[in-house]
Amino acid sequence: MPIAGAAMIAIVAAAALWQGASHSSAIPGDEYVLLQGGRDSTLPGPIGATPAAAGYFGETEGRDFAESLRLGPPKPRIGTVGYEITGRTDRELLVRFGLQPGDVLVSIDNLPLDPNRMAGLGNELAALDKVEIAYERGGVIEDRLVKFQRR
């Protein structure tokens, strides 16, 4: 009888584990983000892009952001090329994202900018919830996490 009781306890415990694994304990509205490159977001280091499921959730306002930027011609920088944000860019947009005319964009998500990438930037950012933008202001390179809302 003790063996049968132990077997019954094992069966009940296994069923409880299986049932717990099949039900999520996530609270509605929780979000899970996979960072580009598979980095653990709790570790120090660069912040990676969070590609959104564009087909399911729709675009973010990243396309509007990219297409609203008015940039000057490429400027050589140490090891890269930068694009200066001109005064023709909507000031409200710049303030909202913590940028200003004269800032020189040097990378997005730690990837360099070049004419080919800049041409497709609207499509790239339309699928992202957030990006890390590196820019030069007053001779100092700064990083800013820019978050985009869903449409």
Image (cartoon, rainbow, N blue to C red):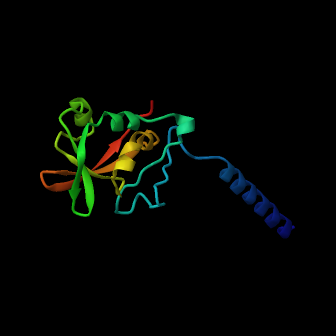
Quadrant of the snapshot with the C terminus: top left
In this picture, residue 83 sits left or right of residue 140: right
Residue lying at 34% horizontally and 62% vertically, measured from the top left? 45
**Quarter residue 88 falls in:** top left
Give the image quarter of residue 12: bottom right
Q: Quadrant of residue 39?
A: bottom left
User: Considering depth in this image, is 31 or 8 the residue closer to the camera?
Assistant: 31
In the visual, does 34 lie left or right of 22?
A: left
Q: Position of residue 60 (x, y in %)?
A: 43, 36
Query: Among all residues in the image, which is located at the extreme bottom?
Result: 3
Q: Which one is in front, 142 or 101?
A: 101
Q: Left or right: 13 with respect to 134?
A: right
Asked whether 135 or 118 is in front, the reply is 118
Measuring from the top left, give residue 42's x and y in whole percent.
40, 59
Picture layout, residue 85 above or below residue 9: above
Vertical order, 114 against 148 (above or below): below
Q: Is residue 127 above or below residue 1?
A: above
Q: Residue at x 68, y 49 (%)?
A: 22
Q: For the point 47% across and 35% down, which residue is it?
A: 59
Q: Quadrant of the N terminus?
A: bottom right
